[in-house]
Image (cartoon, rainbow, N blue to C red):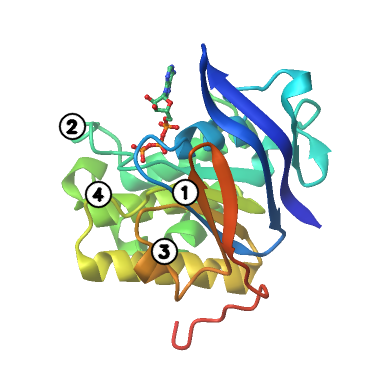
Amino acid sequence: MEAIAVRGLNFSYGSTQILKQIDFTVPESRFAVLLGQNGAGKSTLLKLLLGELSPSEKNGRISIFERDIRQFKNWKSLSYVPQSGMASCQNFPASVEEIVQANLYAQIGLFRFAGKREKGQVRQALLQVGMKDYAKQLIGRLSGGQQQKVLLARALVSQPRLLILDEPATGMDEQSTEDFYRLVKRINLEQGVTVLMVTHDRKRLEAFADDIWLLKDGDLELIRAGEGECAHGDL
Ligand SMILES: Nc1ncnc2c1ncn2[C@@H]1O[C@H](COP(=O)(O)OP(=O)(O)OP(=O)(O)O)[C@@H](O)[C@H]1O
């Protein structure tokens, strides 16, 4: 099955065309990377995939898990990790577990307390990213790398089938970056979660990615096609 299928997509801001007739496919369980220079249109493409922007009908077709995005309802199956997501929230008075739990509000309801099941889900997500011992800490007290792991747990808590990450390692040191990519790869391999990651870090991600796409001058090109079995030696 294709997790993402884009056919003949055009997109413009006013008279400036950003995407020109692009075709783009991410098969289920693949780890795909999207490269491109600043301003190439990567975030614009992600916004289109996340339903924040919509193309007019004559400007192409986007399908998520083989359903046209205009009819797609199962948004729970898709999670997003933003770039430096907590950077502007250093004084945000929320604990790590509250940040993760917030992604379960659709399940819990906004004004109810989390039950045993939800608390278990939060614990499991924090365990997956190695942040279980930080559950009660204030998010603003953590390092940038730890905060990004919490945002990854937040994305995983709803058990998505597709994980979209926008330059998730921006500002991290070398070791934290490597650890973060390794963690995402492990989730991809062990749980079969499809991954699409926007990055400038081609060199390091070559070891983790199956497919590598390059967005340039409005065109999207598959510059390395994997077999879907890019296992990384010692995860
Ligand atoms: N809301 C908007 N209105 C008009 N132009 C926009 C808007 N958002 C982005 N752009 C322009 O569209 C182009 C693509 O922007 P986009 O943010 O998608 O690029 P990007 O590849 O994600 O860049 P970066 O790597 O710097 O994050 C840029 O020239 C940008 O200035």
Q: Is residue 69 above or below residue 138?
A: above
Earlier residue among tags 4 and 2 = 2
Residue named by callout 3: 129
Earlier residue among tags 2 and 3 = 2
Q: Which of 60 and 93 is in front in this view?
A: 60
Q: Residues within 10 Å of mark 2 (few under 14, many from 20)?
A: few
Considering the image in quadrants, where does the C terminus appear?
bottom left
Residue named by callout 2: 91
Q: What distance separates the C-alpha of mark 4 from that of mark 1?
A: 24 Å
Residue named by callout 1: 165
Q: How crowded is mark 3: few (under 14 residues within 10 Å), some or many (20 or more)?
A: many
Q: Nearer the viewer, mark 3 or mark 1?
A: 1
Determine if residue 144 is in view. yes
Q: What distance separates the C-alpha of mark 3 from that of mark 1?
A: 15 Å
Q: What distance separates the C-alpha of mark 2 from that of mark 1?
A: 24 Å
Return the mark for residue 112.
Answer: none
Earlier residue among tags 2 and 1 = 2
Q: Nearer the viewer, residue 97 or 82?
A: 82
Q: Nearer the viewer, mark 3 or mark 4?
A: 3
